Image: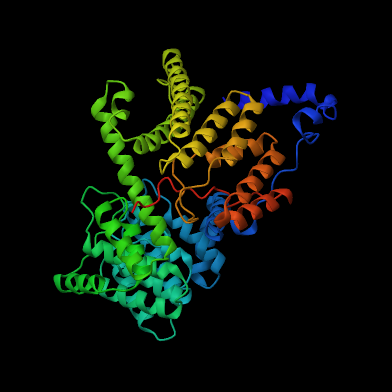
Amino acid sequence: MRRAIGLTFAAKMRFIGAACVAAMVLVGACRQAGPPAPLRERPETAIPAETAWLLERMKEVEQMTPEARAALESSWFRAPGDLRAAEQLLLLYAQNPGNVPAASREARLRHRQRLILWFIDQHPDHFVHRAYLTDLSSRSQRPWLIDPEGYRAATDAWRRRGERTDTSAAALGNAASFLSASDPRRAEAFLIRARRLEPEKSDWTTALASLYTSVLYPPAATMRGGEVIDADAAFVAAVRERVETSRDAGLLSAMGRSLMLRDTTAAKEYQRRALAVDPGHVEATKALASVEQLDWNRRLNTLMAKKTPGPREAALSSLSTDERLRALVYLANGDYLHAEYADWMATHPPDAEQRLPENIAKRRAESRDSWHRSKDLAQQALTLASAHPEEPSAADAIFHAHITLGLNALRDGDHAAARQHLDLASKAPPPSTSSDSSPIDELSLEDRFIKWLLKDGERETVIAYFERLAAGNEPARDRLTRAAADLRNGIQPRDYFRGKSIYAPRS
């Protein structure tokens, strides 16, 4: 367990502290006495403004007494205008009213309708329009917010607002968001205008791509979260023609990204079209690599499922050496993450059944087995990659194997072994491509390893790791050097991942 790691390290430090200077000859550096000051977040990585706003307003509403809520409602509707009070009311009206009389529910809906119309008129660029707080649709997943009369009134208000020549890009985006399901033609026109007003802002391209993919690739009725667009045949044909003849790499790439979890074949085609228009398009390069990785993961999982309940070795042996390297890394990391989950469930059982001793014992055994498999698979990857350095995935397999083995060592309380694996990871052969734009594998443990090392006081160890990576990775040198400098200045590092190529597009 993670708590056990921290305690083991703390106990060691009590014995090592007095001999730190003498140990310099052996270990090369003296650990900092006492815990380091907590790392500070960069301002740009702090909690997003919209999230901070929501948390603040929710706290304000929760602290209100019923009398204060009634007074707020009464005073605002007598004299509308106070934005903070209006925001608080939006949160109040978004709450489930419970079992209240029908007359009270109807009055609440009418008050909420008036409030939303006020926001459209007075604050059309406010981000609340992009949240559930102003949802009125019959498709709302919160039944108490459904208001057909209010929806019609808000639809008319957004159409009028969007047609005005002085409407900002943010307001046009909000109007398009509200109208996309019922009036996709007008939503498209508003998003095109928003892109013209703010061509450097990717939000409008992403929103337009989402609208187009919803029109051309309607989500299945069983798919949760997919927007159903009421588009007539003529509009669908017009959108298809615009997309098929488009030379807009940003739009094509955004369409591909929106389809990644629904239609990987179409997603890859859009990314390839984007790269045909702009071969250096970074987002398209990353997205194509990601969707190809998804396809590969699915193929591997299917292969493994066919071999069960037989041993994994039977499935792995059917792969080429390069494919086996990728599979070993993927499975080793997946087993580690599964072990963490099983261990967490054993120590934090969610219900009475899971708290039964036999179920806790089962979870603990499951976590032990998964951790053991993770180490074994990582070691297999390291051995195979070292024996076949000519394989395209060998360099990345060596890197990932050391990261996984190091994190397992840290979990076992062996900081010396963890530091050694981190050092060897930083000295792994460079990626087989010089590109620094390949995506981070969603099962990569590098981020986890670095964060736990920092939590356990290994700041100098991590700084040295960043600097060694920077020295051997020219494309990533600047960002890795910045990460080391940030850490020296007590700032939480960002963008410190090694530029990995194991899942980059294959030619």
Q: Farthest left residue? A: 233
Colour setup of the view: rainbow
Q: Tell me where residue 136 appears, x and y as whole percent.
A: 33, 62
Q: Tell me where residue 46 appears, x and y as whole percent.
A: 60, 55
Is residue 139 visible to the viewer in this orientation of the structure? no
Q: Farthest top residue? A: 358
Quarter of the rendering occupied by the C terminus: bottom left
Rendered view: 484 above or below 456 = below
Rendered view: 149 above or below 460 = below
Q: Tell me where residue 63 appears, x and y as whole percent.
A: 58, 49
Residue pictured at 57% horizontal, 51% vertical = 473
Q: Farthest bottom residue? A: 165
Residue pictured at 53% horizontal, 42% vertical = 429
Rendered view: 39 above or below 27 = below
Is residue 303 visible to the viewer in this orientation of the structure? yes
Residue pictured at 25% horizontal, 26% vertical = 307
Of the pair 374 and 50, the residue shown nearer to us: 374
Query: Count the marks: how many?
Result: 0
Of the pair 244 and 382, the residue shown nearer to us: 382
Instruction: Write down the quadrant of residue 319 in the picture.
Output: top left
Quarter of the rendering occupied by the N terminus: top right
Residue pictured at 20% horizontal, 73% vertical = 241
- Residue 315 is left or right of residue 24, and the answer is left
- Residue 88 is left or right of residue 224, and the answer is right
Instruction: Write down the quadrant of residue 15 in the picture.
Output: top right
Rendered view: 272 above or below 396 = below
Q: Tell me where residue 460 appears, x and y as whole percent.
A: 72, 41
Of the pair 458 and 46, the residue shown nearer to us: 458
